[in-house]
Amino acid sequence: MPEEFGRGYLYLHFRSMALVVQKFGGTSVADADRIRNVARRIVGTAQAGNGVVAVVSAMGRGTDELVALAREVSDRSHPRELDMLLTAGERVTMALVAMAIQDLGVEATSLTGSQAGILTTGRHGQAEILEIKADRVREGLAEGKVVIVAGFQGVDPSSKDVTTLGRGGSDATAVALAAALSADRCEIYTDVDGVYTADPRLVDVAARIQELSYEEMLELASAGAGVLMPRSVEFGRRFSIPIHVRSSFHDGVGTWVKEETMEQAIVRGIAHDVSAAKVTVYRVPDTPGVAATVFEPLAVAGVNVDMIVQNVSHDGTTDISFTVPEESLDSATAIAKEVAHKIGAGGVTVDTEIAKVTVVGIGMKTESGVAARMFRILADHGINIEMISTSPIRISCVVRGDKVGEAVKALHTGLGLDREADS
Amino acid sequence: MPEEFGRGYLYLHFRSMALVVQKFGGTSVADADRIRNVARRIVGTAQAGNGVVAVVSAMGRGTDELVALAREVSDRSHPRELDMLLTAGERVTMALVAMAIQDLGVEATSLTGSQAGILTTGRHGQAEILEIKADRVREGLAEGKVVIVAGFQGVDPSSKDVTTLGRGGSDATAVALAAALSADRCEIYTDVDGVYTADPRLVDVAARIQELSYEEMLELASAGAGVLMPRSVEFGRRFSIPIHVRSSFHDGVGTWVKEETMEQAIVRGIAHDVSAAKVTVYRVPDTPGVAATVFEPLAVAGVNVDMIVQNVSHDGTTDISFTVPEESLDSATAIAKEVAHKIGAGGVTVDTEIAKVTVVGIGMKTESGVAARMFRILADHGINIEMISTSPIRISCVVRGDKVGEAVKALHTGLGLDREADS
């Protein structure tokens, strides 16, 4: 009995100390009913004795609708004003969520990114969080209030202009706020149950992963697993904030992303990405420094080059291929053509019909042979590998775009993930 | 010829010096086409050599839609969060207007009420402008930019919370900004051509008034002429800002509201208001101080009592009637009932079927007999006068609601306004 009491006391004590940052994406707050639902969840967490900071996105397709409105008015680029426009989206959600929480008898206050002290670079549409001066968030918490913070937005302290963080920005807001507040955990509520061993739309025996390390999540996210963006995982890793990716539609446990995992899986999951394109500069004179000549101007232009392959030289020339995100394809192609002309290369080809398949597992650090198994499985299915890139815990292969479903399914089965369902 | 040159020079010189504040209401910015239209108008003013600050409202019924959204989520009152929500409306407009202006080759920057330094009281939904620290507006102008400012909104400097100014708030923003910036004029763009001698929907021979004094506009606005709210006229008067009320759909001159007018009209115009209600406390013991007992608690509750009539005493009791805006009727009635009970009055009746007809003219200050003419005209039409109130330049009569059209028409003709069309 004393032991029971002791346990209970510790449990309550732990609960009363916790500070939780919860993030709710657009689908979780798409209408009034869902907003009230989110409010109930936040209130439940608060009434269990936790301090709660909730980060919210724009309602449903709210951001898309504002972008469409901007396009109706203007077909040009207006970065500052577009950010001013888009930040109206989260403003609406945060006020409505705060109202719904107050209706449940819990005090709540909403803050814009600027009010919450989210200081960013001045790069409109793709600003990076520099620092969080969360004084007003702390004040709200100290007054016993739930604090609702607009995701995706911040302010450039030098110009005082409002900025947005780009794709996945609300996740980044949540994890960065959790870090700034030394929160106990960050919960990312989403429309899926967690992180899966592969995209369940491609692999019906894909299973929810119970926990994985920041490094694994980073590799999966970078390789196309859309549930979390790399930048938010990186924040979690840097400040050791456990991230719980879970469904906003039920109370079940999702996927924990954290420092140490119980099991060092050799293969944790498979991600794929059909959005990249391959640019090839062919018949490049094979002289020292030629790669730098190609990639320096791309870096200057902010093109995020992913994989690079340089062929063995024939007749003093070589082919250099690289993959870029779809949205950078036009500028990458233009730059490549300019460079090709300057260095006397044969020319530039573009291939958008590619897909990247990536296998991730922290156990690869110590266990060799995964790459060989991956190549064998693809070969057995007659799937040609066009490019390869690796990290200590990842192997990525570029294949034909129409082969991606077959490749992921074959690897999921062949690398033993089918059996590890909900391990 | 030298004279011609001189005139032209002076004209250009005047134009190049002017700073103009332009305000565009919800109907003027209701869709992408109208926003581009507003942008063209602003650019036209800027390219004529003026500094331009444009104050914009939420698009069309944008504010109503946000209020509806709030009602969907919650049926309670959340003043702070409602203001946070509503201010998203102007944010959208101002960004879109800035984009459209930039597309026409003129630099533009948008500022929220808070960014424009509109400091207000903390009374959410009905905040009053305390001060304008327009540093960022001035910076923008100094950089040669058109500055777009969100109307209707400000910030309470003590709590740092966002506030809204209530009905007519964007007009107030515009005129107050014009005052703070010592602008040469403030242009209020609206969906009518200006201020009319009577509501053209009631009186087809009503005519646009070319100019009128602040005092006249104040009386007309307070009496129900919806085109300008009294608070913005009061700002104009206090800081001597000429206000030009004009159509956003064409370039024609509208109505100037200013200090001195060319002609001191005896009757400038007629306003009417069917939105008020009459509350009567009957059989009130006729003792000293009883009026104070009735009206003090109404004042404390913020009920804006308009007209008051106390009947002659019979048998030691009297009836006290007063009119209140429709939105205050419930609270006024509750307070009146409480007071009636406390002072031993007979009870309280409420009459919502009333209308107020008001005749305004600065010439009444010197010319007597207008009241008598007004009463005679109404009597000749068999229209009973239930309450009367006057100021030096105004006479208001309460009549039955179903008589209001007839009363306004009869007065418009009888007081010679039909002939003064577009005087």
Image: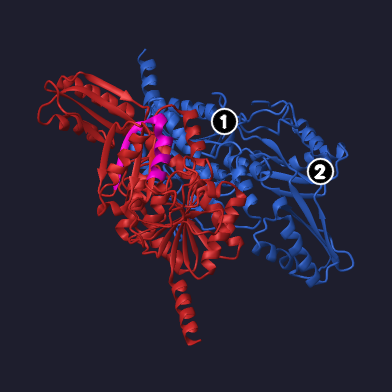
Chain colours: A red, B blue
Q: Residue A133: horizontal and vertical position, in percent?
A: 35, 58
Look at the image and say whether residue A338 sits in the magenta stretch. no
Q: Considering depth in this image, is B244 or A394 the residue closer to the camera?
A: A394
Q: Amino acid at mark 2?
A: Gly
Magenta part of the protein: which range? Answer: A394-414
Q: Amino acid at mark 1?
A: Arg
Q: Residue furthest bottom?
A: A2
Q: CA distance from mark 2 to mark 1?
A: 30 Å
> Relative to B409, is B77 on the left or the right?
left
> Relative to B41, is B82 on the left or the right?
right
Number of residues whose C-alpha sits closer than 10 Å to that of mark 1, classed few (under 14), some (14–19) or many (20 or more): many
Name the residue beneath numbered marker 2: B401
* Local SS, label 1: strand
- Mark 2 or mark 1, which has the lower sequence index? 1
Q: Does B401 sit above or below residue B201?
A: below
Look at the image and say whether residue A397 sits in the magenta stretch. yes
Q: Residue at x 47, y 42 (%)?
A: A203
Name the residue beneath numbered marker 1: B246
